[in-house]
Amino acid sequence: MTGAARMNKKLIAVPLILCIFSLDRFTKSLALSRLYPDKSIPVTPFFYLTYVENSGAAFGMLGGRNTLFIAVSLALIALLLLWLRKWPPKDSLGFFSVAAVVGGAVGNLYDRIAYGFVVDFMDFRFWPVFNVADSCISVGSVLLLISLNWTRAEKP
């Protein structure tokens, strides 16, 4: 891959991160303005919209440690952005996976700074309530692991 092609791919990361952040903000602003705590709106028999203020990490663990999560998020985002700059040009899946994780992390970081908690609203009833940013972090992380395993398998 040429230097120009590599640069173009890296420039794509910024709009992807901004797109994920914007979609996350848009959906959370709808949740904030239209949903109420302790009330669920059924969308389908298995999917509900349920407003939850999550002051913890994944699944509400370690609730109330917002300052810690802000610091960890900032460090993780910085490390991932540095890693993204040095990403191998052939590994598009890994590259876009890291960008998805960063976009999601920035979305949740915004909530922690602006509100002191993360806004969650997607509820499948068998899983903790989550949001778009959480989805991007989770899917991006799984795809990143797959990418790293493929990369490792390709090396002699």
Image (tube, rainbow, N blue to C red):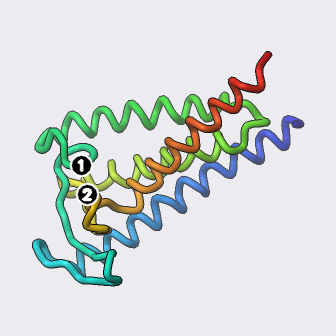
Alpha carbon of mark 1 to alpha carbon of mark 2: how far? 6 Å
Q: Which residue is mark 2?
A: 128
Q: Which x, y percent locates residue 125?
A: 25, 67
Vertical relation: 45 (above or below) 5: below
Q: Which residue is mark 1?
A: 59
Q: Residue furthest top?
A: 156
Q: Which x, y percent locates residue 94?
A: 64, 39
Please identify the quadrant where the C terminus is shown.
top right
Position of 90 with respect to 58 (left or right) is right
Determine the secondary structure under disc 1.
helix
Q: Are marks 1 and 2 in contact (CB under 8 Å)?
A: yes
Position of 69 with respect to 108 (left or right) is left
Q: What's the amino acid at mark 2?
A: Pro
Vertical relation: 109 (above or below) 38: above
Q: Which x, y percent locates residue 76?
A: 41, 33
- 2 or 140: nearer the eye? 140
Please identify the quadrant where the N terminus is shown.
top right
At 46% from the left and 59% from the top, the residue drawn is 21
**Which badge, 1 or 2, is on the more N-terminal residue?**
1
**Which of the numbered marks, if any, corresponds to residue 43?**
none
